[in-house]
Image: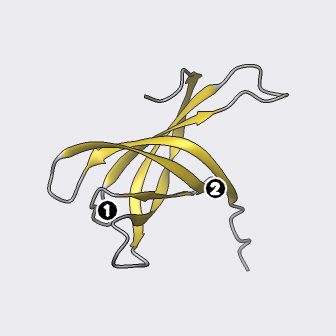
């Protein structure tokens, strides 16, 4: 039996960019709600399709161990979408992450 992937529930500022369901480029500020090595979870107002390609830029704050804040950029494909309440215009986005990532010294997201 396969082990369940460990997911970390944390809130980090995030900037999501990609192409929306209407075929337009977009960028949207949001917050990461959970992440694992295989999936990221967040809310977006932009309308998307399963299979959409997105880039997620995260600001990792300075900590006792981490001397300077970092910017972590990951990309992936929308694997699942969910909308819990019709009155909420945001979709729950589950992004299937690609294997690679980029880390750089980061200034806060715009």
| Label 2 element class | loop
* Residue 44 point in image, percent of width and height: 39, 57
* Residue 55 point in image, percent of width and height: 40, 42
Left/right of residue 69 with respect to residue 26 in the rendered view: right
| Label 1 element class | loop
Residue at left offset 68%, top offset 65% = 5
- Asked if residue 40 is positioned above or below residue 91 in the image, the reply reads above
Q: Which residue is mark 1?
A: 51
Label 1 crowd (10 A; few <14 / some 14-19 / many >=20): few
Residue at left offset 72%, top offset 27% = 62
Left/right of residue 10 with respect to residue 56 in the rendered view: right
Residue at left offset 34%, top offset 75% = 87
Q: Which mark is residue 36?
A: 2
* Residue 105 point in image, percent of width and height: 59, 19
Residue at left offset 74%, top offset 71% = 3
Q: Which mark is residue 109?
A: none
Closest to the observer, 52 or 1: 52
In the picture as drawn, the residue positioned furthest to the front comes out as 87
For the N terminus, give its image quadrant. bottom right
**Does the residue at mark 1 contact the one at mark 2 (Cβ under 8 Å)?**
no
- Residue 93, quarter of picture: bottom left
Closest to the observer, 29 or 51: 29
Q: CA distance from mark 1 to mark 2?
A: 19 Å
Closest to the observer, 79 or 33: 33
- Residue 84, quarter of picture: bottom left
Earlier residue among tags 1 and 2: 2
Closest to the observer, 78 or 85: 85
Left/right of residue 44 with respect to residue 102 in the rendered view: left
- Residue 27, quarter of picture: top left
Label 2 crowd (10 A; few <14 / some 14-19 / many >=20): some
């Amino acid at each position: 039996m396969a082990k369940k992937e460990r997911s970390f529930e944390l809130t980090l500022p995030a900037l999501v960019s990609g192409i929306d369901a209407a075929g337009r480029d977009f960028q949207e500020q949001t917050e990461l709600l959970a992440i694992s090595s295989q999936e990221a979870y967040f809310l977006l107002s932009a309308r998307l399709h399963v299979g959409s390609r997105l880039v997620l830029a995260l600001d990792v704050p300075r900590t006792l161990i981490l001397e300077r804040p970092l910017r972590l950029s990951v990309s992936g494909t929308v694997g699942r979408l969910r909308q819990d309440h019709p009155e909420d215009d945001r979709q729950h986005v589950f992004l299937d992450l690609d294997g690679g990532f980029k880390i750089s010294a980061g200034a806060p997201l715009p």
